Image (tube, rainbow, N blue to C red):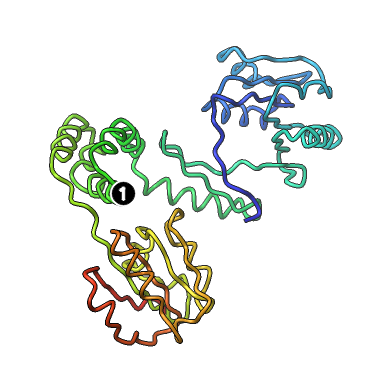
Amino acid sequence: MDYFPVFLDSKRIRAIIIGGGDVAARKIELLLKSTTSITIISPKINATVERLINLHQLTWHQRVFAAEDIGEVNLVISATDDSAVNEKVSNLAQQKNILVNVVDQPELCSYITPAIVDRSPMLVAISSSGSSPVLVRMLREKIDKILPAQYGKLAEFCFKFRDHVKARVKGVRNRRLFWEQMLRGNIGQDILVGKTASAEQQLIVSLKQEVPPPSGDIVFIHTLDGNPECLTLAAHRELQFADAVFYDQDVNPELLEYVRRDAEKYPQDISSTIMVNYQHAIELAEQGLKIIYLLNGATALPQNQALDASSVGKKTFFSGT
């Protein structure tokens, strides 16, 4: 990745914007979704910037930018049409390790602003690392159309009951499965149509029921030619719920991008065509974990007595071309 994706805590942002034109106005409007700790520095401002300053009681210094302006701030945006000023702002900010964005000059930026689909508190950020703004806009439009307007209510609902679920449902995997079942079922649908009280009642009833401990299983995925684009929906879903993944050097490393981020990874030095590490995988599965074993090609696995004798579940997928 050319850029590291990160979300900043809005309560900690102290920003300055250099410039007072249309571009500065757009940046101010974006920042105002998160904070009002904004200072504008510009000899002149247009009507939109003036309205935003008055409406949100922002600070405006009616003068040109000076080096001492970068003091107690932690976010700098330069939105001027003066290349010398933009370069000066960038150099000063980066010398002090302060995040800086110079509009339309990525070479002067230490961060760039992604396209955003806002379903607060749910946010989807999209970036092409500055390579194709048009492609980003097209993708944003697609996501905006398919993501329900009430999706943020789902996140608020989860936050409200997070501690209750954590106290009642033991085990990370159990809680993950519990929440998916709740949000994909009637509870999630009720929230999306505004029936929050009904959703809350259903969740409380579900929490009173005994939740069995998770049962472990091992999923063997033959990746064939290793093309990630050819992963089946079933295989993709299994990867998203993995607690641990085994793979050797023959497996396309791009496939690991589809595995749940906090899953444990166990690279194998010996090719699976020579030896499959059944014993370790079985031990983890017997602890109630979902194990994914990625296998290059399509060679059928030989029968294994330890696996046959184990009580863990076993599944096999052929996923690819």
Q: Nearer the viewer, residue 96 or 150?
A: 96
State the image coordinates of residue 294 (x, y, percent, origin top left).
42, 73
Which quadrant holds residue 154?
top left
Which quadrant holds residue 160?
top left
Q: Is residue 70 above or below residue 1?
A: above
State the image coordinates of residue 194 (x, y, percent, origin top left).
23, 33
Q: Residue at x 24, y 68 (%)?
A: 312
Which type of secondary structure does the marked residue at label 1 adopt? helix
Q: Is residue 296 above or below residue 35?
A: below
Q: Nearer the viewer, residue 6 or 15?
A: 6
How crowded pointer 1 is (Cα within 10 Å; few <14, some 14-19, many 20+) is rated as: few
The quarter of the image holding the C terminus is bottom left
Label count reads 1
Q: Residue at x 48, y 68 (%)?
A: 255
Q: Read off the residue under disc 1.
A: 176
Q: Residue at x 23, y 38 (%)?
A: 168
Left or right: residue 311 versus residue 45 is left
Q: Amino acid at mark 1?
A: Arg
State the image coordinates of residue 173 (x, y, percent, origin top left).
31, 52
Left or right: residue 214 versus residue 250 is left
State the image coordinates of residue 296 (x, y, percent, origin top left).
45, 80
Q: Residue at x 76, y 22 (%)?
A: 71
Q: Nearer the viewer, residue 211 or 80?
A: 211
